[in-house]
Image: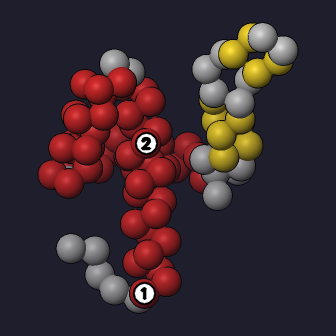
Amino acid sequence: AGLAPFDNKSGKLNRRSHIQGGRSRVRRALYMAALTAVRTCERFKTFYTALAARSGSKKLAIIAVARKLLVVLNAIMRDKIAFA
């Protein structure tokens, strides 16, 4: 959907993965939505703070929130229910 990870590995080199695959417009929209969700929704805020503290990377935590947001949006569309 826009958050397809790409491993940057070659031989013995093992670099950090980054998001390259997927649609860039969807990825940008999910990133901006994740920034807003972290500020306004308590569920995403607690997930973000715990992950940022555990991983040490705030950007990685935002991408994880964007993925979680995508999963929630998919479930809302699939089950035709409201977000609570």
Res 64 label: 2
Relative placement, left or right, of 5 versus 60 is right
* Circle 2 residues within 10 Å: few <14, some 14–19, many ≥20: many
Q: Position of residue 27 (x, y in %)?
A: 58, 46
Relative placement, left or right, of 52 versus 74 is left
Looking at this view, name the residue that lies furthest to the right. Answer: 11
Q: Residue at x 66, y 16 (%)?
A: 15
* Circle 1 residues within 10 Å: few <14, some 14–19, many ≥20: few
Q: Is residue 24 visible?
A: no
Relative to 9, say whether 30 is above or below. Answer: below
Relative to 49, say whether 34 is above or below. Answer: below
Tell me the kind of residue under disc 2: Ala
Number of residue marks: 2
Q: Residue at x 15, y 52 (%)?
A: 42
Relative to 16, say whether 50 is above or below. Answer: below
Residue 69 quadrant: bottom left
Q: Position of residue 60 (x, y in %)?
A: 44, 30
In-front residue for pair 11/43: 11
Looking at this view, name the residue that lies furthest to the bottom. Answer: 80
SS at mark 2?
helix
Residue at numbered disc 1: 79
Q: Residue at x 38, y 46 (%)?
A: 65
Screen quadrant of the N terminus? bottom right
Relative to 10, say whether 66 is above or below. Answer: below
Mark 2 or mark 1, earlier in chain = 2
Q: Position of residue 32 (x, y in %)?
A: 43, 43
Q: Position of residue 40 (x, y in %)?
A: 19, 50
Looking at this view, name the residue that lies furthest to the top. Answer: 12
Q: Residue at x 64, y 51 (%)?
A: 2
Residues at marks 2 and 1 touching, judged by CB atoms closer than 8 Å = no
SS at mark 1?
helix
